[in-house]
Image (cartoon, rainbow, N blue to C red):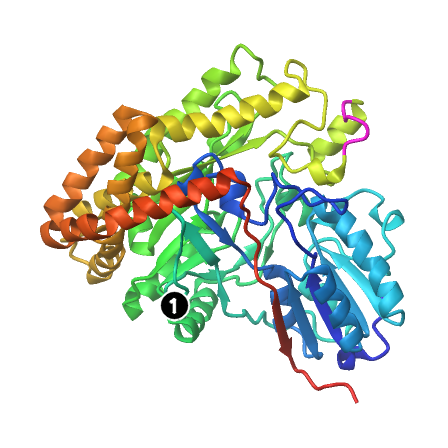
Amino acid sequence: METHPKGSHARILLSSVFGPYAQDDEFGSRAINPMELYHNQVTRAQGGFSLRMFHRSWGIMMIQANISAPCSVLDFPTRKAFARELTKNHYDVVGISSIIVNVGKVREMCRMVRELSPDSTIVVGGHVAAIPGVETTIDADHIVRGEGISWMRRYLGEDEHAPIRHPAIISGIETRIMGIRLPQRKGGTAATIIPSVGCPMGCNFCTTSSFFGGKGKFVNFYETGDELFEVMCKIESELKVHSFFVMDENFLLHRTRALRLLERMKQAGKSWELSIFASANAIQKYTMLELVELGVSWVWMGLESPRSSYGKLQGTDIGQLTRELREHGIRVQGSTIVGLEHHTPDNILGEIESAVGYQTDFHQFMLYTPVPGTPLYQEMADQGRLLADIDPADIHGQFKFNFRHAAISREDSKRFLDWAFWRDFEHNGPSLYRMCQTMLMGWQRYKDHPDPRVRERFTREVKKLSSAYNAALWVMEQEFKKVNRDVSDRIHKLRREVEKEFPVVARLTAASLGPVLLWCTRREEKRLAKGRTYEPPTFVERSNWVSAS
């Protein structure tokens, strides 16, 4: 691989694709596919109770932190902001990161670079690089597939094997729920930590697994629990956080690393909260006490159909596992695929009902989707089942099939998906209510635990439940009377349990704050009905920066 002639003196711009995102336009934005993970894929049917937030483009932030060249990160720019950055500053290299649906924006940004900064070398990375033949459809000099830190280091003539420096990253920004934007106070939001990329499970539909090498492959940034602990201590100190969103596709698979991290946490008296991704079979390698002591407070777990062939669920009673996790105060984010090969109009509703019956705190539903670059995509291509003329902007699992299913039409795929979201909301209530339920069970079980770290964590978590969350329960109880009276009664029962635990604060907060939240929620519902959408702010961050002469 040739290095850039200026090496580490080259001036670098790393950019995500331009917005706005939550609209239909000629560049591939889709109103149904906003730049909001939860509202897009998890709580989208929950109206004013939908959890809404944005997540930064962590990949380009990681690259910036791990090169010595002068570098700017431009995250969530407008088209004008991207053009202004190109003309205001001279860049030797312009890197553009994108997912597949935004390939149209990548194409336009490459065109803009050629016009406004013709001497710049264009590098394109992220999942968009997995599109077969993408180099023939966009005007880029380099297409980077897989992990980007080592590639950029090699390109700049730097040591690709140098230790990974982890930037201090706030996991979510501009969080909103019930019409209220939550304050962004220091330490109030979890930090993101990325121990590794890729997933060795190798599910045939998984873009992450295939992008980083496929089945059995992954890239560890931090091999040991000691390394991970030191990084987390540094970020804790810088951001004043107690909680971490662990962006690792199957964190618990690395058992030796996880248990060593637990040892170090015990030695240092750390009462951290960890939100993790893990498969059912990995979770079952730990006792509930080990998970609780490790600080696991939230787990995202795949709940594909029991009739599917994916090994990560084999031998697992998902209903029992989900109940047990929640009873120990661990919030569960389920993820279910709609439209698997064995699904038919006759059995799919029953399978959705089974998924809803797990009663997870949150539930993501995604269409079975052959995404370019995955084994499933190649299988469908070989079988001649890919639909022609489907815009890449519509291949994201939240719209309609992009292939011919044996029993379900493209139009029906969307109807079944939409119904899954609605059924989960209608039957189980808002995710915020379910989360409160799990938090209370955890508090009641562990408030007198002999380990002071465990007591401290649950005491910290329950503060929200005893105050603002109880006011939110009052609102959900009122609003759900017109959706599902049984759920409203369950919310009422939970609220009474909270007020029994915290008789003064919880009752006063519900009485004083409840009516305000009810008004805000109803106002938000009216705004959403009129088409209100939300967009992330633009970020410009520079490192090793010296203005060009």
Based on the displayed image, in which of its 4 quarters is residue 429 positioned? top left
Based on the displayed image, in which of its 4 quarters is residue 18 positioned? bottom right
Nearest the viewer among 354 and 549 is 549
Q: Is residue 441 depicted above or below 196 in this figure?
A: above
Image x and y of residue 480, in percent: 31, 31
Residue sitting farthest toward the top: 346
Q: Is residue 499 depicted above or below 235 in this figure?
A: above
For the point 76% across and 52% down, the residue is 105
Q: Which residue is mark 1?
A: 185
Image x and y of residue 232, in percent: 43, 67
Q: In the rendered image, is residue 459 in sight?
A: yes
Q: Which three-letter amino acid code belongs to the residue tagged 1?
A: Arg
Left or right: 515 in relation to 113: left
Q: Is residue 397 depicted above or below 297 in this figure?
A: above
Q: Which residues are magenta?
A: 385-390
Q: In the rendered image, is residue 285 in sight?
A: no
- Secondary element under disc 1, as helix, strand or loop, is loop
Q: Is residue 408 magenta?
A: no
Characterize the local packing of mark 1: few (<14), some (14-19) or many (20 or more) Cα atoms within 10 angstroms. few
Quarter of the image where the N terminus is located? bottom right
Label the magenta part by its dominant secondary structure: loop
Nearest the viewer among 128 and 419 is 419
Based on the displayed image, in which of its 4 quarters is residue 97 positioned? bottom right
Image x and y of residue 2, in percent: 86, 69
Image x and y of residue 202, in percent: 61, 39
